[in-house]
Image (cartoon, helix red, strand yellow):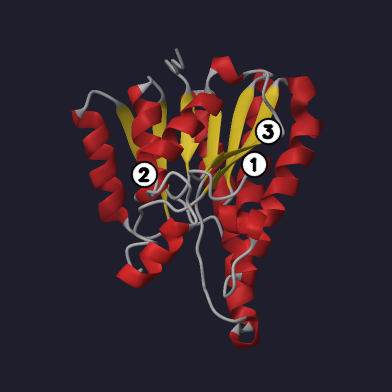
Amino acid sequence: MFELNQKVAVVTGGSRGIGRATAEVLAAQGAKVVIGYASNEAAAREAAAAITSAGGNAEIAALDVSDSAATERVIGDVAKRHGRLDILVANAGIAIDGLLLRLKDEDLEKIWAVNLRGAIVCARTAIKSMMRAKAGRIVFLSSVVGEMGNAGQTAYAATKSALLGVTKSLAREYASRNITVNAVSPGYIETDMTKSLNDEQRQAMLTGVPLGRAGSARDVAATIAFLASEEAGYITGQTLRVNGGMYV
């Protein structure tokens, strides 16, 4: 089940965390994975090498989703070189936390450029190829914060919440072309972004998780792989929560 043989997938922000785990899982299921990275080429190469050594197929691409022209060029080139683009995982994201009164305009613009506009531009470009093939899978990475809110993360929450509306709208727009559009909403996941939490903060987070543990990047990646598969062909416009019951 969930075989992705010969499918071509682009994973933005694919050099670490959830993005890397997703690239690894998609490749393990047979997909040819393009790992998009904004700046850390070494990490992207390491991720691709790990996939290749495990018998998978991966390549890397410099892909700063905040640059719309570059994003269109890179994703368009992937579709052209491989003759298809079956799966887009819009995972790239940043967080600039702080109370609203302390957030600067440039902080807001940066978060929106990456988390929201960047994801939309990725989808817009991928859809061009998917429409020709009359098939495709798009998965956006939202967040539990976008659903339940969190003090000090107003801008981040705004972008992740907005992606849920984008998901529903695009699902309606392109269902007739057999393109499904869904979102995955992770909760407290052990990644580089959460490693900075101290023990007190970590325990406070865990008290709100009924399963009593943090999730792993692989937990999220497995959900994404399902949504990218043929078995999920009748699922579109939905948000799958991978949060251990943190928000239901």
Callout 2: SS: loop
Which circle's residue, 3 or 1, is located before the other in the chain?
1
Judge whether 38 appears above or below 18 on screen: below
Q: Mark 3 near mark 1, Cβ–Cβ under 8 Å?
A: no
Query: Considering depth in this image, is 128 or 25 the residue closer to the camera?
Result: 25
Q: Amino acid at mark 1?
A: Ala
Task: Tell me the quarter of the picture where residue 198 sits.
Answer: bottom left
Label 3: few (<14), some or many (≥20) within 10 Å?
some
Q: Amino acid at mark 3?
A: Lys
> Which residue lies under the disc numbered 2?
216
Q: Marks 3 and 1, Cα distance to the nearest angstrom?
A: 9 Å
Judge whether 129 appears above or below 70 on screen: above
Residue 103 on image: x %, y %: 60, 82
Q: Amino acid at mark 2?
A: Ser
Task: Tell me the quarter of the picture where residue 155 sits.
Answer: bottom right
Marking on residue 123: 1
Judge whether 156 appears above or below 20 on screen: below
Judge whether 218 appears above or below 142 on screen: above
Eye-nearest disc, 2 or 3: 2
